[in-house]
């Protein structure tokens, strides 16, 4: 039996107090609903149907390049009504897994267990909660078979004592949904078409409902407000930190480490506090990262040291480089092995050759720097004339004197030198000294100004 997935995401999320639909808010850098889609994709379903309503255009845009079938629920008349919108798209012979766009941390393994249990045609994910307030209660008969789900608002005193609750996640055969959903009524305290009422229909047809539980409760927790979002964010970050530590990474404080994406790692990496890793990042072995660094979509080679307060994005750093403190590598930066980039240095779309040093206060953009060059403090590549960008080439072994302005396009030859304070706008051949600054005069009759009376 093939699998189809329905993700319910039509609710507004009033309590988020946001112009953005709730399911597009982000947890660890990814929208809640994108997370659910990604988890669903790992189950290799034939189809993923996304029921949207509020903020429809934003949701459609977010998934326009993805294999997701958006289905509109114009009016939100309840979870049963939401699933019913997808019925025309569903194959009767398939198992249908129902997920929620605002329950972001559900695990693939839990869902796989639930799907495996749906051989009778119906399985339900339930969980025992110490405080079941607000949830639909699972009502069982004396043989422990599930008989019904009663919503909190419709439950009797006795039913309110039940601690086993409906997570909302279920797996049901397509033909059952097609038969039962049109039969739902909205005759209940909320005037909604409850998906949960199909449980009683299954019971009346003697379809046995199997139940399964998540490994951990947070998997089935939904998000309604920003406080709950922050709670699940912390749970998720703690899990990621624990995974990394179990794989040979030292986190100086796992509570002050954030990963918003994927991190591939070697071993014996030490990461100091307040590091944020975003997008796809690779860290080689023996990398050391100082406090307050941000690394986004970058690969960092073995033995690299990144000192405090550095920002690295869309860059490739080879082995044994030293970066920072306070360095900024912008997109398109490549540091070859053993390069050094020091404090208050910004590099953009440039390659820095093996062993070259840019140690202090520089802007290097659209530049290729050869091997073992030394770029003095305060060197600026003037790569932009206000309209166009131009390239600078700095050869192997070049020595750029402090406070040089290299006015692009310009080439500095191998082992060439620039005099400190030069504005260089002509190529310098290899081995030459290029100097372009006003000559010094000393005035021996000079009198210091004196304060006016
Ligand atoms: C639902 C269950 C309840 C369960 C609880 C778990 C029903 C009737 N009740 O209650 O048994 O314990 O989840 O959290 O199913 N949605 C739509 N369209 C709609 C209505 C809802 O897409 O017309 C989406 C919402 O965006 C939300 C989800 O379905 O993500 C759940 O809806 P909600 O009304 O919050 O259900 P609960 O009252 O929490
Ligand atoms: Mg409701």
Image: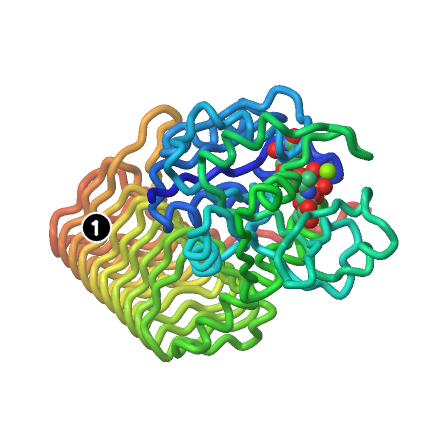
Name the quadrant where ligand 1 sits: top right
**Residue at position x 32%, y 27% in the image:** 388
Residue 389 lies, with reference to residue 372, above or below; the image says: above
- Crowding at label 1, few (<14), some or many (≥20) Cα neighbours within 10 Å? many
Q: Which residue is mark 1?
A: 394
Position of 36 with respect to 365 (left or right) is right
**Residue at position x 42%, y 60% in the image:** 360
Colour convention? rainbow
**Residue at position x 56%, y 52% in the image:** 124
Position of 189 with respect to 216 (left or right) is right
Q: Secondary structure at mark 1?
A: strand
Residue nearest the viewer, comparing 265 with 64:
64
Q: Is residue 36 visible?
A: yes
Quarter of the image where one finds residue 95: top left
Residue 91 lies, with reference to residue 450, above or below; the image says: above
Q: Position of residue 34 (x, y in %)?
A: 48, 42
Residue nearest the viewer, comparing 233 with 4:
4
Q: Position of residue 117 (x, y in %)?
A: 45, 56
Q: Position of residue 180 (x, y in %)?
A: 56, 32
Residue 325 lies, with reference to residue 383, above or below; the image says: below
**Mark 1 CB lies closer than 8 A to ligand 1:** no
Residue extending farthest to the top is 74
| Rendered-image quadrant of the N terminus | top left
Q: Is residue 11 visible?
A: no
**Residue at position x 47%, y 32% in the image:** 62
The image shows a total of numbered marks equal to: 1
Residue extending farthest to the right is 157
Q: Position of residue 269 (x, y in %)?
A: 39, 75
Residue nearest the viewer, comparing 129 with 33:
129
Position of 282 with respect to 63 (left or right) is left
């Amino acid at each position: 039996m093939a699998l189809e997935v329905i993700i319910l995401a039509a609710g507004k999320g009033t309590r988020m107090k946001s112009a953005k639909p709730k399911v597009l808010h982000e947890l660890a850098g990814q929208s809640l609903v994108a997370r659910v889609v990604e988890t669903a994709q790992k189950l290799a379903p034939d189809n993923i149907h996304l029921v949207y309503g509020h903020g429809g255009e934003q949701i459609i845009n977010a998934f326009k390049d993805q294999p997701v079938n958006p289905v509109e629920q114009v009016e939100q008349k309840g979870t049963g009504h939401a699933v019913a919108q997808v019925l025309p798209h569903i194959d009767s012979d398939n198992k249908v897994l129902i997920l929620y766009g605002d329950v972001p941390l559900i695990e693939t393994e839990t869902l796989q267990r639930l799907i495996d249990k749906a051989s009778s045609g119906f399985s339900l994910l339930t969980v025992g909660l110490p405080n079941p307030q607000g949830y639909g209660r699972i009502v069982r008969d004396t043989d422990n078979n599930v008989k019904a789900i009663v919503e909190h608002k419709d439950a009797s005193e006795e039913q309110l004592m039940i601690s086993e609750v409906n997570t909302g996640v279920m797996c049901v055969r397509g033909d059952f949904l097609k038969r039962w959903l049109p039969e739902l009524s909205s005759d209940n305290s909320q005037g909604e078409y409850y998906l949960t009422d199909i449980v009683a229909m299954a019971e009346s047809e003697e379809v046995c409902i199997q139940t399964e539980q998540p490994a951990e409760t947070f998997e089935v927790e939904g998000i309604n407000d920003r406080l709950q979002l922050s709670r699940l964010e912390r749970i998720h970050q703690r899990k990621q930190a624990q995974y990394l530590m179990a794989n040979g990474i030292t986190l100086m404080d796992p509570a002050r480490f954030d990963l918003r994406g994927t991190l591939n790692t070697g071993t014996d990496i030490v990461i100091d506090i307040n590091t944020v890793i975003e997008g796809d990042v690779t860290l080689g072995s023996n990398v050391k990262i100082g406090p307050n660094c941000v690394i986004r979509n970058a690969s960092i080679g073995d033995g690299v040291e990144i000192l405090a307060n550095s920002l690295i994005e869309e860059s490739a750093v080879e082995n044994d480089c030293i970066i920072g403190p306070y360095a900024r590598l912008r997109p398109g930066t490549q540091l070859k092995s053993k390069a050094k980039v020091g404090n208050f240095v910004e590099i953009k779309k440039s390659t820095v050759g093996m062993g070259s040093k840019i140690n202090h206060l520089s802007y290097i953009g659209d530049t290729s720097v050869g091997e073992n060059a030394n770029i003095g403090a305060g060197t600026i590549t003037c790569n932009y004339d206000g309209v166009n960008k131009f390239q600078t080439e700095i050869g192997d072994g070049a020595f750029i004197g402090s406070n040089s302005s290299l006015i692009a396009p310009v080439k500095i030859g191998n082992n060439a030198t620039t005099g400190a304070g030069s504005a260089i706008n002509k190529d310098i051949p290899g081995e030459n000294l290029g100097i372009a600054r006003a000559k010094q005069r000393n005035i021996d009759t000079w009198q210091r100004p004196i304060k006016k009376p």
